[in-house]
Image (tube, rainbow, N blue to C red):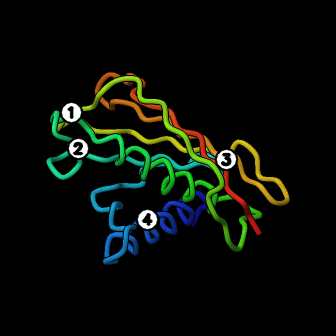
Amino acid sequence: MSTTRNLLRTLQDLITLGQKTEKFNRIFQGIRVVASRKPGHVQCELDIDEQHLNRNDTLHGGMLTALTDSVSTLALETNENKPLKSASVELSVSFLKAAKKGETLVIDADTVKLGRTLAFLSVEFRNKKNNELLATGKHTKYVT
Protein backbone atom coordinates (compact mmCIF):
# COMPACT_ATOMS: atom_id res chain seq x y z
CA MET A 1 0.00 0.00 0.00
CA SER A 2 1.35 3.43 -0.85
CA THR A 3 2.53 5.91 1.75
CA THR A 4 -0.23 8.32 0.72
CA ARG A 5 -2.92 5.69 1.28
CA ASN A 6 -1.46 4.85 4.70
CA LEU A 7 -1.38 8.53 5.56
CA LEU A 8 -5.00 9.04 4.50
CA ARG A 9 -6.09 6.01 6.52
CA THR A 10 -4.23 7.29 9.60
CA LEU A 11 -5.80 10.74 9.23
CA GLN A 12 -9.28 9.28 8.83
CA ASP A 13 -8.68 7.11 11.92
CA LEU A 14 -7.79 10.26 13.90
CA ILE A 15 -10.97 11.97 12.65
CA THR A 16 -13.07 8.93 13.57
CA LEU A 17 -11.53 8.85 17.04
CA GLY A 18 -12.43 12.52 17.51
CA GLN A 19 -15.99 11.87 16.35
CA LYS A 20 -16.51 9.23 19.02
CA THR A 21 -15.42 11.35 21.97
CA GLU A 22 -17.61 13.37 24.31
CA LYS A 23 -14.87 15.99 24.40
CA PHE A 24 -14.46 19.04 22.17
CA ASN A 25 -12.90 17.03 19.33
CA ARG A 26 -16.39 15.89 18.40
CA ILE A 27 -16.36 18.93 16.10
CA PHE A 28 -14.83 16.39 13.72
CA GLN A 29 -18.32 14.94 13.19
CA GLY A 30 -19.05 15.17 9.49
CA ILE A 31 -15.46 15.92 8.44
CA ARG A 32 -14.01 13.76 5.69
CA VAL A 33 -10.29 13.52 4.90
CA VAL A 34 -10.06 13.64 1.10
CA ALA A 35 -6.36 14.16 0.34
CA SER A 36 -2.85 14.60 1.62
CA ARG A 37 -0.64 15.82 -1.23
CA LYS A 38 2.56 15.61 0.79
CA PRO A 39 3.77 15.27 4.37
CA GLY A 40 2.58 18.29 6.32
CA HIS A 41 -0.62 18.73 4.30
CA VAL A 42 -4.21 17.57 4.69
CA GLN A 43 -7.40 18.38 2.80
CA CYS A 44 -10.79 17.77 4.38
CA GLU A 45 -14.40 18.48 3.50
CA LEU A 46 -17.40 19.35 5.63
CA ASP A 47 -21.02 19.59 4.53
CA ILE A 48 -22.42 22.59 6.38
CA ASP A 49 -25.62 21.82 8.25
CA GLU A 50 -27.80 23.31 10.97
CA GLN A 51 -25.43 22.57 13.87
CA HIS A 52 -22.68 24.68 12.22
CA LEU A 53 -24.75 27.86 11.80
CA ASN A 54 -24.93 31.12 13.71
CA ARG A 55 -28.11 33.16 14.26
CA ASN A 56 -27.72 34.64 10.76
CA ASP A 57 -27.93 31.13 9.26
CA THR A 58 -24.32 31.24 8.04
CA LEU A 59 -21.34 29.19 9.16
CA HIS A 60 -20.37 30.23 12.69
CA GLY A 61 -16.98 31.92 13.00
CA GLY A 62 -16.25 29.85 16.08
CA MET A 63 -16.59 26.72 13.99
CA LEU A 64 -14.03 28.05 11.49
CA THR A 65 -11.71 28.95 14.35
CA ALA A 66 -12.00 25.49 15.91
CA LEU A 67 -11.44 23.89 12.50
CA THR A 68 -8.34 26.04 11.99
CA ASP A 69 -6.96 24.64 15.24
CA SER A 70 -7.95 21.02 14.71
CA VAL A 71 -7.31 20.53 10.99
CA SER A 72 -3.96 22.36 11.04
CA THR A 73 -2.95 20.08 13.91
CA LEU A 74 -3.85 17.11 11.69
CA ALA A 75 -1.55 18.54 9.01
CA LEU A 76 1.22 18.84 11.60
CA GLU A 77 0.71 15.17 12.51
CA THR A 78 1.49 14.13 8.92
CA ASN A 79 5.05 15.48 8.99
CA GLU A 80 7.81 12.88 8.81
CA ASN A 81 9.42 14.36 11.95
CA LYS A 82 6.13 14.97 13.72
CA PRO A 83 6.35 16.32 17.26
CA LEU A 84 5.41 14.16 20.23
CA LYS A 85 3.32 16.93 21.75
CA SER A 86 2.11 20.35 20.70
CA ALA A 87 0.22 23.28 22.18
CA SER A 88 -1.29 26.34 20.54
CA VAL A 89 0.63 29.58 20.97
CA GLU A 90 -1.26 31.83 18.55
CA LEU A 91 -4.22 31.38 16.24
CA SER A 92 -5.98 33.82 13.91
CA VAL A 93 -8.73 33.59 11.31
CA SER A 94 -9.66 36.10 8.62
CA PHE A 95 -13.30 35.81 7.55
CA LEU A 96 -13.74 36.81 3.91
CA LYS A 97 -17.19 35.55 2.93
CA ALA A 98 -20.01 33.71 4.66
CA ALA A 99 -20.79 30.06 3.95
CA LYS A 100 -24.35 28.77 4.07
CA LYS A 101 -26.19 25.59 5.00
CA GLY A 102 -25.98 22.97 2.27
CA GLU A 103 -22.63 24.16 0.94
CA THR A 104 -19.54 21.97 1.16
CA LEU A 105 -16.49 23.48 2.80
CA VAL A 106 -13.05 22.42 1.51
CA ILE A 107 -10.38 22.81 4.19
CA ASP A 108 -6.72 22.83 3.09
CA ALA A 109 -4.15 22.83 5.90
CA ASP A 110 -0.39 23.05 5.43
CA THR A 111 2.69 23.01 7.60
CA VAL A 112 4.52 26.17 6.55
CA LYS A 113 7.53 25.47 8.78
CA LEU A 114 8.31 22.92 11.46
CA GLY A 115 11.15 24.17 13.61
CA ARG A 116 12.81 22.86 16.75
CA THR A 117 10.25 24.40 19.13
CA LEU A 118 7.62 26.07 16.93
CA ALA A 119 5.40 24.95 14.06
CA PHE A 120 3.78 27.45 11.69
CA LEU A 121 0.60 26.25 10.01
CA SER A 122 -1.85 27.75 7.52
CA VAL A 123 -5.42 26.90 6.54
CA GLU A 124 -7.66 27.92 3.64
CA PHE A 125 -11.42 27.42 3.61
CA ARG A 126 -13.08 27.33 0.18
CA ASN A 127 -16.54 26.72 -1.24
CA LYS A 128 -16.33 23.38 -3.07
CA LYS A 129 -18.82 24.42 -5.75
CA ASN A 130 -17.01 27.53 -7.00
CA ASN A 131 -13.60 27.36 -5.24
CA GLU A 132 -14.26 30.77 -3.69
CA LEU A 133 -12.00 31.61 -0.74
CA LEU A 134 -14.15 32.00 2.39
CA ALA A 135 -11.57 32.31 5.17
CA THR A 136 -7.90 31.88 5.97
CA GLY A 137 -6.27 30.82 9.20
CA LYS A 138 -2.81 30.93 10.74
CA HIS A 139 -1.79 28.74 13.65
CA THR A 140 1.46 28.71 15.61
CA LYS A 141 2.15 25.77 17.91
CA TYR A 142 4.84 25.04 20.47
CA VAL A 143 6.22 21.57 19.72
CA THR A 144 8.31 19.07 21.68
Q: Nearer the viewer, mark 1 or mark 4?
A: 1
Proximity of marks 3 and 4: CB atoms separated by less than 8 Å: no
Q: CA distance from mark 3 to mark 4?
A: 18 Å
Label 3 sits on a secondary structure element that is strand
Which residue position is annotated with label 1? 100
- From the image, state whether disc 4 or disc 2 is nearer to you: 2
Asked if the residue under mark 2 is in contact with the one under mark 1, i.e. CB atoms within 8 Å, the reply is yes
Depth check: 66 or 130 in front?
66
Quadrant of image for the N terminus = bottom right
Q: What distance separates the C-alpha of mark 4 from that of mark 2?
A: 19 Å
At x 71% / y 65%, what residue is drawn?
A: 82
Which mark is nearer the camera, 3 or 4? 3
Q: CA distance from mark 1 to mark 2?
A: 7 Å
Q: Horizontally, is 125 left or right of 117 in the view? A: left
The disc, 3 or 4, on the residue closer to the chain's N-terminal end is: 4
Q: What kind of residue is marked 1?
A: Lys
| Left or right placement of residue 124 versus residue 29 in this view | right
Q: Secondary structure at mark 2?
A: loop
Q: Are marks 2 and 3 in contact (CB under 8 Å)?
A: no
Q: CA distance from mark 3 to mark 1?
A: 28 Å
Return the residue at label 3.
Answer: 111
Camera sees residue 39: no
Residue ID for mark 4: 12
Compare marks 1 and 4 and give the one earlier in the sequence. 4
Assign a secondary structure to mark 1: loop
